[in-house]
Structure formats: C-alpha cells, structure tokens
Image: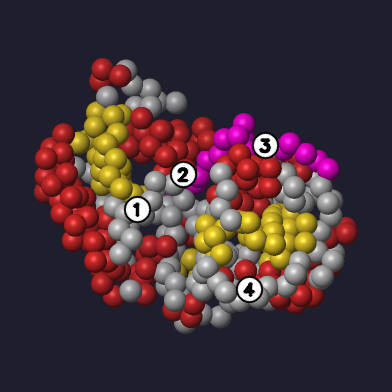
Amino acid sequence: MLKIDNLRKENILMTFVHESSFVKRDIEILKKNYFVYKFCFNSKSKVFLPIIFFKQFFLLLFLTYKLKALVIQSAGYHSFLPTVFGIIFKTPVIIIAIGNESIKLPEINYGIQRKKYLSWFVNFSLKKARLIVPDHKRLEYSEYDHTPVKFKNQGIRSFNKKIKTNIIEMVNGYDSKKWKITSLNRIDYTFLTVSDTIDKTRYFIKGIDLIESIAVLNPYCQFTIVGKLELTKVFPKNIKFINRVNQNELVSIYNSNKYYLQLSMSEGFPNALCEAMLCGCIPIGSNVAGIPDIIGEKGYILKEKNTFILNNIISNLSNNTFSPNEVRTQISNNYPLERRENEFLTHVNKII
C-alpha cells in the first residue's frame, strides 16, 4: 500500500451529499496519504440550494489553490463548482460514480439523466473531470435487459457520446472483520433485504414489489426489510419491516436470515449485498450492474424481472448446496477493503 510521511501530506477536498459510512470509509483511505478537507453539500430542499452554493463557492475560492486534487462522490449540483474551480486552478477532479448519475428509467421516475437541468450539471462535471472511477464497469456502458424500458442503453457513455474523460472501474471493498458470521443456526426460508428508505420509487428500484408478490405466493416464507418505510400501503403478514439500524445491529440481522434478496431494477455495486454475503447470507440477485459479478457462482441470479421465475428459484431452495462460509469467501477473496485502498490511492497518486 502506498504510504506518505505525515510531514509531506498534500491537501485534498472530498465533496459529497451524504456522509454515509462508505463516504467515511473513502475519507479514511485518503487520510492515509493526504490531508483531507470535507464539504457536505446537503440541501434538504431546493429552496436552500443558493445558500449551499454560496458556502461552497467561498470555500473553493479560498481553498482550491492549496489543493492537489478535488474528489467528488457521484455527480450532481454538488460537483459543478468543484469542477469549475478545478478547471480554473488546473487542479485534477476525480468523480466516484456510484450509479445514479448514469441511469435513465422514466418508467419508475428514477435516474438523474431524466432530469433536464440536473443532468446538465452532471454531464458537465463528468466531461470536465480528469478521472471517473465507477464502482462497476457496467456504469460506464451497459445494455439494459432486466425488464423492457424505453432507454435500453444505459451508463455514462450512453448519455455523453463524446466524453473524453478517462474511466476506470474501482470496485468497493469490505472489512471482513466487521462483517462476519456469528451464527450458522439459521431458520430455512428466511429472507432479508436492506434499503435506506422504502418510498414510491425505491419500492421498484429495490425490488420490494417482487418481494411482495412472492410473499403472497409463499406464505411459509418470512421476509424482513430493513429501512425507513415511507409507504402507507398494507403488506402481506409474512413481511416484517425494521427501521434503520446501526451497523452492529445489522450484523446481527444478517446472521438471523438464511437468504439475502437484491432484486434491484438499478444498482451500482450494492454494499448491503456484499455485507450480507460476508455474514453468510446466500444471495439471490437480479441481473443488474455489479450484482452478477458480486454473487459469481455462489448464489442465484434472476435473469429478468419476472415473478414466476423468481418463485421457481424460491421453490427450489430445498436443493440449495451453498454454505455460509463459501458465500463469505466469495466477497472476502474478491472484494477486500485492501483492494479498494490500493486502487484508490494509486489513482489519486498518479493523477496529482
């Protein structure tokens, strides 16, 4: 791993919308070699956007000349000014693409690329950045075939035909000491899904609609969904909702379920799926973005969004031969935290 003496650390600004656990992880990685300034562009309402832009402008005005790089998680309104200042001060801009900036699914009102003005800010940032590091190669370009949609071609290059920015895959990495198997005594036909929120859009994005359908068809199965429920509809009795929990509680919940469902219509590189597999949950996932690569040959892939096909997978789980330990090994071997650290620091070091 690349290491730099504290006395020689250069300055980097990390910009993000939400300081999630994975943003914090990337900040800690950068701190190994650099001094990291942080800016959270978090506006709960568009009314406050001018205020956030104002604060960001003056921060960049007095800070950019000190910086060796501007690192931005995802692209949006928050990436515009850092990109502009990067151009003016000739400071390289690195954008970590996580999925929402490269998708357009008007069928379910999802994806930044369907929004006329926001997409302009996104695409300007992507075109002017020095480097884009998507967390899976299918965010660069892919042909969407999970279910019929108007825009079959998805990904950064689909919406930026003449983009010249260098794009290099940088997958996520996970701490196998934190996400671990604590119990092998799990009840059959227990299924788990994790989503930050469950609203009208995420109901489809995270495949909650499919879970509801198979719950009706399989009343002997128990389904648990972790996340803030923002829908008022009535769900089948064998679906239980748990509000947001901390990571220690989440480890316990993963270890209380035999299977993990990642039935997303759109994804990048889903963190919860990898965490669940490290905790020994046998995965069942859709054929979207990084999900098939994550699961590999240690779980089940839903080739298309189809309740009948999914129900057939569920019905045949009595023949399951995957063990929690081999599922865990799929992630610990292929996506360790050290891989993310090495690739991230190497990219930043090269670009500055």
Residue occupied by mark 3: 180
Residue at position x 82%, y 70% from top?
A: 219
Where is residue 29? Give x, y as percent: 41, 33
Q: In this view, does 336 lie to the left or right of 163?
A: right
| 333 and 118: which is toward the camera | 118
Residue at position x 45%, y 33% from top?
A: 342
Please say whether residue 101 is one of the residues in the magenta stretch: no
Count neighbours of disc 3 (C-alpha within 10 A) and say few if under 14, some if 14 to 19, many if 20 or more: many
Mark pair 2, 3: CA separation: 18 Å
Mark pair 2, 1: CA separation: 12 Å
Mark pair 4, 1: CA separation: 28 Å
Circle count: 4
Mark pair 2, 4: CA separation: 27 Å
* Label 3 element class: loop
Question: Which amino acid type is marked by label 1?
Answer: Val
Mark number, residue 70: none
Count neighbours of disc 1 (C-alpha within 10 A) and say few if under 14, some if 14 to 19, many if 20 or more: some
Residue 122 can be seen, yes or no: no
Mark number, residue 17: 1
